[in-house]
Image (cartoon, grey):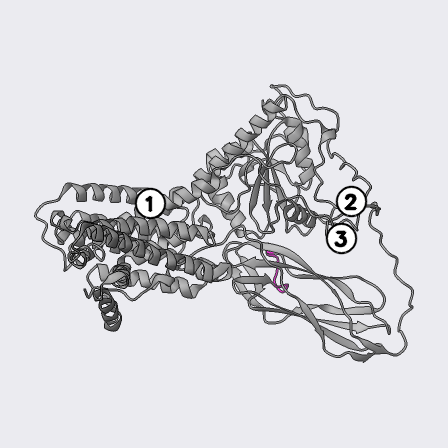
Amino acid sequence: MRKYLFLLGLFFLVSSVFGQKVPSADWSYAITKSNVKVGDVIEVIFTTPIPEGYHIYSNDYGDCPPVKAQFTYTENSSFDLLGGANAIGSHHYIDDIFECEVADFENKAEFRQQIKLLTSNPDIEGILEYQMCTSDGMCVIFEYDFHIDGLNVSGESLVSDKKPTEVKPIPIAEDPKIEPVEPQNIIDKEPLTLKNNQSSTEGYTPFAGLISSDSVNYSGYQAVSKKDTTLCEVKTFQGESNEESTTYWGLFILAFLSGLAALLTPCVFPMIPMTVSFFMKDGSKAKAIRNGFIYGVSIIAIYVFIGTLVAVVAGPAAANWLSTHWLPNIFFFLIFIVFAASFFGAFEIVLPSWLVNKADQQADKGGLIGIFFMAFTIVLVSFSCTGPIVGSILVQSAGGAFVKPLIGMLGFSLAFAIPFSLFAIFPNWLNSLPTSGGWLNFVKVVLGFLELAFGLKFLSVADQTYHWGILDREIYIGLWIVIFLLMGFYLLGKIKFSHDSDMPFLKVPRLLFSIATFAFVSYLVPGLFGAPLKALAGYLPPMSTHDFNILESKDDHKPYYAGVKPLYEDKLHLPDGLRGYFDYEQGMEVARKIGRPVFLDFTGHGCVNCREMEARVWSDPRVHNLLDEEYLVISLYVDEKTVELPEDEWFYNKKGKLIKTLAKKNSTIQECFFDANAQPQYALLDNEGNLLQPSKTYDLDVEGYIKFLKDGLAEYQAKMVNNK
């Protein structure tokens, strides 16, 4: 009982939180001196702490897509700005995704602005617009409104006190009782008659009973007046959805199967005789059943406690740090390498003797406490083999906060505990077990190869996050090809380790495993030349790191839906030749007229996860066809800096702020309708703006995405039939 590993339960939580609500920064300002004279120059210092796992883009880099921090002052004659805001201590680097230089802040952001005072009562106010981003690529644009107070200025004004001309926004009713005016339709209000042979819709026949335009108001995100602070009506799906239950059951089944697989590992199998010898002394059958049940429940409780404790204590910020920071990822990578070397026979991993002796002493005492410590010993001793499997379960439950880790660990520990409980109840079953020997060494070495392959994932995360460029996609795939080729040769008996038994002939199971391994290598080879290998998208580096990409862009021009040209198409675009719109009302109105459901895409120029979804999921022909032929896509960019709304489209949001730009409008729509501010986010809507399925965020599961789209389409068709 000396083949043990130091307790590493907390080292294998690697998770990414998607769809979370990104917090805003806590900005403040300070003035270098408050008692000044007219004509003096002051310096205003803007600072904010930045939470762990987040960063803010600076303003001191060139033309690169991430949104820069920007100060906008309300101009008047009481002050002059001397230059722009200077970034203090920003970090410059080459962004791997955008292939250009950017600068950002971590832990703390600081800007300094020099201002010359021209009057004794300066009115200095403005807005700081900045982008707060998580370490895994989600970015949200926020605003910080400031008004510089605390100045004691003496002396005569250097300029006239004449007030600047006030620019008034569009008149909006101040009486909250006034009904909101229906938004103006951007396209012709006349009913649109479509025939199956019209090229504008490519033969698409809308459903009968289309919703009339006078029954729809898409602008519920707008306030009816500046004083209107009513709560937004967040969209919720009213139908039946099995998404969560399917996810939970899928996670439970995966964890249960992983627990069964863990029983075959060389660290666990030898523990069965120890279990039998411990429970042999129980005389009565009833006592054996009771003790076996307590034993199994103890194993489950220990594993579940580890998983849920890690999930609750870690929290989103710690999960982000664990999943993206180079230090934990390199540590996990090295741990997997150490495991692999041990399984190959390089050395034995042992626990400190004092820990093993302590557990043994408590187990020898018998009784309920002894049974619990016997279970704890089993968990502790087997962790050298089950640790990586437990870590994989926790990875699969990423983002589940409390429930998913609990379900994952429950499934794993249940499968793991059942055989031990049965052997505790029926210890005579030991005689029917195969003896330890060559087949256990075979399992051990195969695990070593697998740990080498999966350990590269941690190194890849660190490499992509910090732009080291040492493990690009083709290098990663090449290493996997070598690892699995060696594993295939080992299965055939062409490679032998020091602790392997002689193999006079090749057994059928090893032959089948070797065939499967070489088939997998054959699947990997085209990936060296740019094949997408979509089945492994979650494990491989993104396609953007590949030097040669054979994917072709679908850029053939297609006619506009109903002949309606999208607003802002000169500045905004959709990937892979998809057609769609970039204004919410325009897109909703076109979808209503042609009788299609809406695919609402909240995205951004600087959104890395959005680009990954488009490259890995939207590029799938099935997803592409559903979006192009069954839905109408509306992409709402929340970080578009150049598009300002026409003055007659300005509006107040329900926080009393005047919205003048397309980006602010789109952000308002997302926060009001979906109570979210992180991208990407995808929502399926009918022609009245109701959800057809629960909204979806970053998820590289193509099959799940196809199901999401098909379920939404079925829901839409059922609603349209009811509207006939």
* Other residues around mark 1 within 10 Å, as few (<14) / some (14–19) / many (≥20): many
Q: In the figure, is residue 358 to the left or right of 652?
A: left
Separation of disc 1 and disc 2 at Cα?
A: 58 Å
Q: Which residue is mark 1?
A: 524
Q: Quadrant of the N terminus?
A: bottom left
Q: Nearer the viewer, residue 339 or 488?
A: 339
Q: In the figure, is residue 329 to the left or right of 145?
A: left
Circles 1 and 2, Cβ within 8 Å, touching? The answer is: no
Residue at (82, 43) in percent of width and height: 177
The amino acid sitting under disc 2 is: Val
Residue 155 against residue 379 in the figure, above or below = below
Mark yes or no: residue 477 visible: yes
The amino acid sitting under disc 1 is: Leu
Separation of disc 1 and disc 3 at Cα?
A: 55 Å
Q: Nearer the viewer, residue 680 or 118?
A: 680
Dot 1: element: helix
Q: Which residue is mark 3?
A: 656
